[in-house]
Image (tube, rainbow, N blue to C red):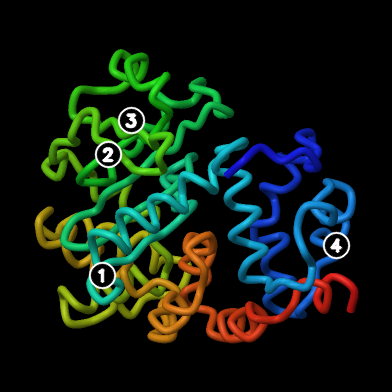
């Protein structure tokens, strides 16, 4: 893509917010976004992009700007979604979770298939201040731990993370290159920590699957009793039960159809609403509408 003369580069951060839930959710639910209309006008996009083109084309165009000038966290998440989840795996057997809670941290991207793999994003706009704490917490929960960063920061990363940590780079050609392959950490997973990342509906499902029943105790005690039972399950078994359960989190079979009709620029967002059929259907219906019909309705 050639350098544009009309986009105000000071608005690149504002453009990156277009792909966040705070902007995409209202669009999916109500068919309009005040933020989208404002940034379209103020950033110079209205001079650079033909509003008679489709919303589909609009998202791809904005994403191409970010990919060239402002590779923020969403660009990395989307690359992982397209290159790893959809490129190497299958939605039938794999699941991608974003902002997955691990203690006091939130893992940027987690991919679940037969294993649990976490990807911590460190773009050029991210600080390394919390990296050590983040990685240490992930080693208590996941099988494979990766950091994905820029090529200029990859060497520095080797000295900052444990040797078992994989180091990946999002290249200028928008491919994901492996600098160092992650090594299995499964034997070090702590069930007591992993349990705390689960919802009540999830840990009770695991308990019933393994023991055949859910303890009949008051709600005030269910968490404590289930945690004790969970931690007594052999590690290999509880890991697999947990992966299989988490793969059902916010899941709808409709996601397969939605992904096929969604532009590649929206893959990460699409996967983040994979259990919300109404949002997916509404957005699918909007994607072929002309941009001006959405911005000026």
User: Reading the chain from its start, which is encountered first: label 1 or label 2?
Assistant: 1
Residue 145, numbered circle: 2
- Residue 240 x/y as whole percent: 16, 63
Viewer-nearest of discs 1 and 2: 1
Q: Left or right: 153 with respect to 279?
A: left
Asked if labels 3 and 2 touch by Cβ distance under 8 angstroms, the answer is no
Mark with earlier residue (1, 3): 1
* Disc 4 element: helix
Q: Secondary structure at mark 2?
A: strand
What residue do we see at 41% from left, 77% from top?
A: 251
Point 30% across, 65% down: residue: 226
Which residue is tagged 4?
Answer: 37
- Tell me the crowding category of disc 1: few under 14, some 14 to 19, or many 20 or more residues within 10 angstroms, Cα based: few
Residue 136: give its label. Answer: 3
- Name the outermost residue toward the front: 2
In the image, which is nearer the foreground, mark 4 or mark 2?
Answer: 4
Residue at image x 22%, y 43%? 144
Q: Position of residue 30 (x, y in %)?
A: 77, 80
Question: Which labelled disc corresponds to residue 266?
Answer: none
Between 90 and 108, the one lying in front of the other is: 90
User: Which of pointers 1 and 4 lies earlier in the amino acid sequence?
Assistant: 4
Q: Of residues 128 and 20, which is closer to you in this image?
A: 20
Mark 2 Cα within 10 Å, few/some/many (few <14, many 20+)?
A: many
Check disc 3 and report its element: helix, strand or loop: helix
Q: Dot 1: what SS?
A: loop
Q: Where does label 1 land, which residue?
A: 90
Gap between marks 4 and 2 measured at Cα: 39 Å
What is the C-alpha distance between the residues marked 4 and 3? 42 Å
């Amino acid at each position: 893509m050639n350098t544009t003369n009309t986009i105000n580069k000071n608005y690149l951060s504002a453009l990156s917010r277009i792909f966040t839930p705070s902007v995409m959710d209202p669009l999916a639910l109500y068919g309009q976004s005040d933020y989208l209309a404002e940034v379209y006008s103020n950033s110079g996009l209205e001079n650079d992009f033909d509003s008679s083109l489709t919303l589909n084309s609009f998202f791809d165009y904005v994403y191409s700007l970010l990919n060239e000038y402002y590779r923020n966290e969403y660009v990395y998440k989307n690359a992982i979604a397209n290159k790893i989840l959809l490129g190497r795996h299958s939605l039938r057997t794999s699941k991608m979770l974003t902002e997955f809670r691990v203690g006091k941290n939130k893992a940027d991207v987690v991919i679940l298939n037969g294993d649990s793999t976490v990807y911590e994003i460190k773009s050029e706009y991210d600080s390394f201040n919390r990296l050590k704490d983040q990685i240490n917490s992930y080693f208590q929960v996941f099988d494979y731990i990766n950091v994905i960063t820029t090529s200029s920061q990859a060497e520095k990363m080797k000295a900052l993370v444990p040797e078992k940590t994989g180091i990946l780079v999002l290249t200028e050609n928008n491919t994901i290159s492996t600098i160092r392959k992650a090594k299995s950490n499964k034997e070090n997973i702590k069930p007591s920590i992993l349990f705390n990342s689960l919802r009540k509906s999830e840990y009770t499902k695991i308990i019933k699957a393994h023991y055949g029943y859910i303890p009949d105790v008051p709600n005030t005690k269910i968490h404590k009793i289930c945690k004790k039972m969970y931690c007594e399950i052999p590690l290999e078994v509880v890991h697999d039960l947990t992966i299989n359960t988490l793969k059902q989190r916010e899941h709808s079979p409709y996601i397969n159809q939605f992904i096929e009709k969604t532009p590649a620029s929206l893959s990460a967002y699409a996967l983040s609403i994979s259990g919300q059929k109404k949002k997916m259907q509404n957005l699918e219906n909007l994607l072929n509408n002309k941009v001006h019909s959405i911005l000026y309705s």
